[in-house]
Image (cartoon, rainbow, N blue to C red):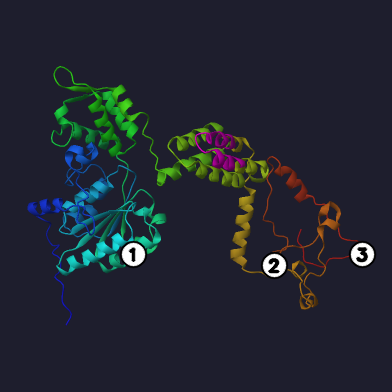
């Protein structure tokens, strides 16, 4: 008879002493058992020291952990399910996982998607199996889960599916694109939002008042303008705000009474420049490139160069920008100015050859050229119409005169017969049907009147078509 494992007791949330035990074992590496967090308070940044330990202290994300929200109830009742915490940097993903670990009877193991491998996952699963036999659940927290490749994610899947591991993944990237569908289907996705200005201000006030973990012992006097600038420049990232605040406070000299005054200049110096809200792997990455594309498409060179600068100054890969400009040249400038594609390709090659910071010159030149060029999306609309027709009508037969006759049998069947070689006719245009019979006369390409494409329209609309002397065509045609 198979041995029955004890069921983990999840009916009641852990007591205070149990939470203390949970805190001592919080975030241990698989195999070694070494704690990952918390860091010794003396050497940890302010953002880490101020990390809340209860949901009551958690700032922001009321839509997830506010009263009567489903995730809040799951945490309070210790009935956790696999989940993906998706949000921008500094929105509280790791902090929420930290709070969860203090509210659960389960053993929490944390690994990083940057440094962990399949061997670490296997070890975590094996240790979880041992705890399972003793009646204890295991929560596996994977920070930056989007950094795991398909094989690594696949190795987690069977353990999540069986219930051996409860997965909590944290990511700044859209999980629809970065987490495998089978794994994603077994987890709930919770979207964390950037902290609001009010939430950021509340976090700053707490840090200034907390003498044990925060900056309360420094008796800080933070100017209103400095506070407002700190909130604005952090861009909803609580980690940026707190760590910049600590830098400014430590740099300020105490006055005769022992207080430290932090003014606007001190905060500006701590931040150095605006803390640009930009994650090369997250949604902001796509928001900014979308703004660049739409500005170029809208023929606004000033907006185009602004969004380009936003991306490059934030550290975007210049070759990513170059690739987007190449696509833009073909999709949105198109046949109105065919040279635009050459300009964009040349910019990509130059950026690859010289690198940053000089790569900004060819990229700026290309962005401005494309923004000022005449626009046509006729290539896109033509292909879209043709693709839609292919989906509608399926695999229509190729007309016999267009088929390739490479054998005697094919020629006997009429392949290639009565095909007209265009260069033998005036204007190099042969008046013959090139579409399947069912689509004869159908028009997919509609040239615009913009730029050089206007001349293409004239050629298409008034072809100098002719038949060879003494030759007739009896193929269906609709004018």
Residue at the extreme top: 256
Closest to the camera, between mark 1 and mark 2, is 1
Q: Secondary structure at mark 3?
A: loop
Residue at the extreme bottom: 1
Q: Quadrant of the N terminus?
A: bottom left
Q: Does the rendering let one see residue 460?
A: yes
Are circles 1 and 2 on residues that touch, CB within 8 Å?
no
Q: Which residue is identified by label 1? A: 155
| x and y percentages locating residue 11 in the rendered image | 13, 62
State which tag comes first along the sequence, 3 or 2.
2
Residue 210 in the image: above or below residue 188? above
Mark-to-mark CA distance, 3 and 2: 28 Å
Q: Does the rendering let one see residue 430?
A: no
Q: Residue at x 24, y 51 (%)?
A: 97
Q: Nearer the viewer, residue 63 or 171?
A: 171
Residue at the extreme front: 32
Question: Is residue 358 on the magenta stretch?
Answer: yes
Hey, which quadrant is residue 183 in on the image? bottom left
Residue 145 in the image: above or below residue 314? below
Q: Which mark is residue 470?
A: 3
Hey, which quadrant is residue 409 in on the image? bottom right
- Binning the other alpha carbons within 10 Å of mark 1 as few (below 14), some (14 to 19) or many (20 upward) gives some
Q: Quadrant of the C terminus?
A: bottom right
Q: Secondary structure at mark 2?
A: helix
Closest to the camera, between mark 1 and mark 3, is 1
- What are the residue bounds of the magenta stretch? 346-367
| x and y percentages locating residue 355 in the rendered image | 52, 38
Q: Which mark is residue 438?
A: 2
| x and y percentages locating residue 102 in the rendered image | 16, 51
């Amino acid at each position: 008879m198979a041995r029955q494992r004890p069921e983990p007791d999840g009916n009641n949330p852990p007591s205070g002493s149990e939470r203390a035990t949970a805190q001592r074992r919080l975030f241990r590496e698989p195999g070694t058992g070494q704690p990952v967090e918390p860091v010794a308070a003396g050497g940890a940044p302010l953002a880490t020291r101020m990390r809340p330990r209860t949901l009551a202290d958690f700032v922001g994300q009321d839509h997830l952990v506010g009263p009567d929200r489903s995730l809040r109830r799951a945490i309070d009742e210790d009935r956790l399910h696999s989940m993906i915490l998706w949000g921008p940097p500094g929105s509280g993903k790791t902090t929420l996982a930290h709070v969860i670990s203090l509210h659960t009877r389960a053993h929490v193991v944390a690994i990083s998607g940057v440094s962990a491998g399949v061997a670490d996952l296997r070890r975590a699963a094996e240790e979880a199996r041992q705890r399972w036999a003793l009646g204890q659940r295991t929560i596996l927290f994977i920070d930056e889960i989007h950094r795991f490749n398909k094989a690594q994610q696949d190795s987690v899947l069977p353990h999540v599916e069986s219930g051996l591991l409860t997965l909590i993944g944290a990511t700044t990237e859209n999980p629809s694109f970065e987490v495998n569908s089978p794994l994603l289907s077994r987890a709930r996705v919770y979207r964390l939002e950037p902290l609001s200005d009010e939430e950021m201000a509340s976090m700053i006030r707490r840090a200034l008042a907390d003498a044990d973990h925060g900056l309360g012992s420094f008796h800080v006097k933070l100017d209103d303008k400095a506070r407002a600038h700190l909130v604005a420049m952090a861009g909803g990232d609580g980690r940026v705000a707190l760590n910049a605040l600590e830098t400014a406070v430590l740099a300020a000299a105490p006055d005769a009474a022992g207080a430290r005054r932090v003014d606007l200049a001190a905060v500006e110096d701590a931040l150095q420049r605006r803390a640009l809200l930009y994650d090369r792997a997250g949604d902001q990455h796509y928001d900014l490139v979308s703004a660049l594309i739409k500005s170029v498409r809208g023929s606004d060179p000033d907006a185009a160069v602004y969004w380009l600068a936003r991306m490059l100054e934030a550290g975007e890969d210049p070759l990513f920008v170059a690739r987007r400009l190449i696509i833009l040249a073909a999709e949105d400038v198109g046949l109105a100015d065919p040279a635009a594609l050459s300009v964009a390709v040349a910019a990509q090659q130059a950026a690859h050859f010289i690198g940053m910071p000089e790569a900004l010159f060819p990229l700026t030149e290309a962005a401005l050229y494309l923004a000022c060029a005449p626009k046509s999306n006729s290539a896109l609309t033509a292909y879209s119409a043709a693709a839609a027709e292919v989906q509608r009508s399926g695999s229509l037969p190729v007309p016999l005169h267009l088929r390739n006759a490479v054998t005697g049998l094919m020629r006997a069947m009429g392949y290639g017969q009565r095909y007209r070689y265009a260069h033998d006719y005036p204007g190099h245009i042969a008046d013959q049907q090139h579409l399947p019979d069912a689509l004869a006369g159908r028009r997919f390409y509609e040239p615009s009147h913009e730029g050089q494409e206007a001349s293409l329209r004239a050629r298409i609309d008034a072809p100098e078509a002719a038949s060879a002397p003494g030759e007739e065509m009896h193929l269906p045609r609709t004018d």
